[in-house]
Amino acid sequence: MLPTSRRTFMALPLLVLLAGAPGAARAAAKGQLPWGLPGDARQARRTFRIRMSDDMRFTPDRIRVNEGDTVRFILHNAGKLEHEMAIGTREKLDERMAAMTQIPYTLHPHGPVRARTHAHDEPGMVHVMPGATRQLVWKFNRAGEFTFACLIPGQYEAGMIGTILVLAHAQPRRRH
Ligand SMILES: [Cu+2]
């Protein structure tokens, strides 16, 4: 058996290797979802300005990006109603919408907002008050067709929905 000091000395380089391995970093990617993960604004390569309006529309409502892009959405609520943008798959947004309708509404001036903001304090979702502009930064590191939508009751059903197409890398590389 090796003296303690020698074992420590030998173990150190291995730890350094593990910490620096790209594979380890990827496996540990915090917040990874099937449609990407929260992005770092400093790495944003593209910016989309999206207008939210009371006719239940996002303008534009079709976004195309490349796999790996970190995208900054600048969301302006041009209406008099609250709006929001939530990114996901159509199925996940349907689920969230169903969960939303179970949050009780109160008439307290700040009650509904606080309850909804809390309920929406999730990655890939931002709530925008009338006249306000907010930012959402998202890293699209999974190719596919995704959805963004406003989950305010009645608005999702009214069609306040858009599409994000994430194009796969051109290389014949396969992830799996
Ligand atoms: Cu809306």
Image (tube, rainbow, N blue to C red):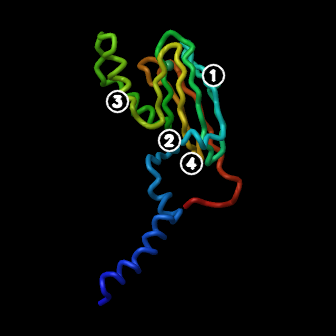
Mark 4 and 3 residues: CB-CB less than 8 Å, in contact?
no
Image x and y of residue 101, in percent: 34, 23
Q: Nearer the viewer, mark 4 or mark 3?
A: 4
Residue at position x 68%, y 60% from top? 172
- Closer to the camera in the image, 35 or 127: 127
How far is disc 4 from disc 2 in space, using C-alphas? 13 Å
Q: Which SS class for mark 1?
A: strand
Q: Label 2 is placed on what type of residue?
A: Pro
Q: Nearer the viewer, mark 4 or mark 2?
A: 2
Furthest-front residue in this view: 5
Query: In the rendered image, which residue does mark 3 sit on?
Result: 99
Furthest-bottom residue in this view: 1
Q: Which SS class for mark 4?
A: loop
CB of mark 4 near ligand 1 (< 8 Å)? no
How far is disc 3 from disc 2 in space, using C-alphas? 22 Å
**Mark seen at residue 142:** 4
Q: Which SS class for mark 2?
A: strand
Closer to the chain start, of discs 3 and 1, is 1
Residue at position x 52%, y 45% from top? 36
Q: Residues within 10 Å of mark 1 (few under 14, many from 20)?
A: some
Image x and y of residue 18, in percent: 46, 68
Query: In the rendered image, which residue does mark 2 sit on?
Result: 38
Q: Which SS class for mark 3?
A: helix
CB of mark 2 near ligand 1 (< 8 Å)? no
Image x and y of residue 168, in percent: 65, 49
Closer to the chain start, of discs 4 and 2, is 2
Q: Label 3 is placed on what type of residue?
A: Ala
Q: Is residue 128 left or right of residue 105?
A: right
Vertical order, 156 against 172 (above or below): above
